Amino acid sequence: MPPPPTTSNGNAAAPPPATIPLSNALMAKLKPAKIFKGAVEPTPPSTPVARSHQGPRHITAITFDDRGDQVLTAAEDETFRLYSCKTGKHLKTLYSKKYGVDLPRFTHRHTTVVHASTKEDDTIRYHSLHDNKYLQYFKGHSGRVVSLEVSPIDDGFMSGSVDKTVRLWDLRAPTCRGLLNLPASPIVAYDSSGLVFAVGVNHYSRILLYDQANYDKDPFLTITLEDPTLALVSYPPRPIYMTSLSFSPNAKYILVGCSGDAHYILDAFEGHLLAKLEGHVGLERRRIDAPQTIDPSKGNSGEEVSWTPDSKYVVSGSLNGKIIIWDVQNLPVRSGVVDLKAHPTRLQPLTTLDGHPGPSRCVRFNPRLAMIVSAGAELAFWLPDQSADNEEIAKELLRKK
């Protein structure tokens, strides 16, 4: 029998952590293990009437570090709050009252983030969580940044703004290294290799795929997002408003998050529309009792839908506070010329979890651990409920007797 592995100091190495495959049964057993009621400061009494009618303040974005050990929230009270995913404890609160905070994204160090500003100017800020200092300012946008993503492989990151530009940056330099001018406000995403990025352009319903090394050339693929089933609801059909893009971890699909009552999954290689995810209430409005606007808008949408790390499931928030999970393991396979009139497969939820008292506007699956973090006016950590497993084991033992 071989000796147990040892570390450089001679001690026995810790066994590798146990892994648990995600399954339909496990996803249905997710329960809120910890709820942080005070994750956002309440609206002060002196707030103008127009603002106070919008209800309680919300968490607007969440981000995990690479190891899935920590999660950081940004909220309308202009704070960052850092939590440990392993202990379920609040670690620290940092304030950004001068510039505001939105779209925080961990870099590849667990002590630094980049984030967008909501006040003062439209600068992107590189921030140290360790000593609460700014390490760099990235100036260039002349409108609010609405999309921000860090490269999965290096110190590059990318931003999209209402000034109709996408800028490519490097953490080591304050000036942008690339600029794309677009006809409308864009949203951005990297694929898992970091070699390709996507730009979604609203009002034109186009998703442009670029080679990272040749971003100054034309996109190598232009995808048209057109859902023929919308014409069955109203004519002319209500336009789709894209609020987020994300490649599946296996790089086969693109998940298009929208502010309406459907999200979409596209084939990442040719652009076929494969699936329409239904069963949630879109986050175009702030409250469920608010009237729907004539023209679609971003609303509170943008952070509510994401993949699980194995690309098997999609999790999403909803205006009614529920957490929706779709099983996307059996998507149709399409190839050849894209048919814009072909109806997508309409997927209903695998399971719907009772979530928040208000909108669940941020939902993310941990990149390493079997947990979901969801947020709205409060923050919740979801873990699989193992008690049901114990009951099944007990029943099995009784059967054997």
Image (spheres, rainbow, N blue to C red):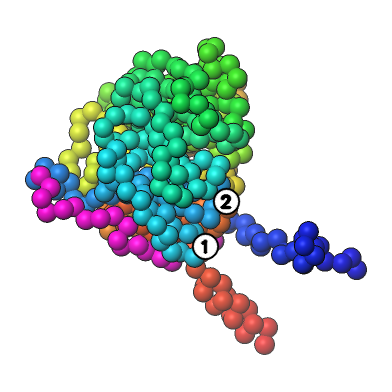
Which residue range is magenta in the image?
25-48
Element at label 1? loop
Q: Residue at x 54, y 12 (%)?
A: 217
Visible residue check, residue 201: no
Q: Are marks 1 and 2 in contact (CB under 8 Å)?
A: no
Which residue corresponds to mark 2? 67
Q: Residue at x 31, y 44 (%)?
A: 96
Q: Looking at this view, is 212 or 236 the one in front?
A: 212
Coordinates of residue 326 in the picture (x, y in percent):
47, 48
The type of residue carrying mark 2 is: Arg
Q: Looking at this view, is 362 or 297 the one in front?
A: 362
Q: Is residue 99 magenta?
A: no
Q: Residue at x 36, y 23 (%)?
A: 141
Task: Note whether 26 is above or below 188 in the view shown.
Answer: below
Coordinates of residue 306 in the picture (x, y in percent):
47, 44
Which circle's residue, 1 or 2, is located before the other in the chain? 2
Task: Note whether 177 is above or below 363 in the view shown.
Answer: above
The type of residue carrying mark 1 is: Lys
Quarter of the image with the C terminus in it:
bottom right
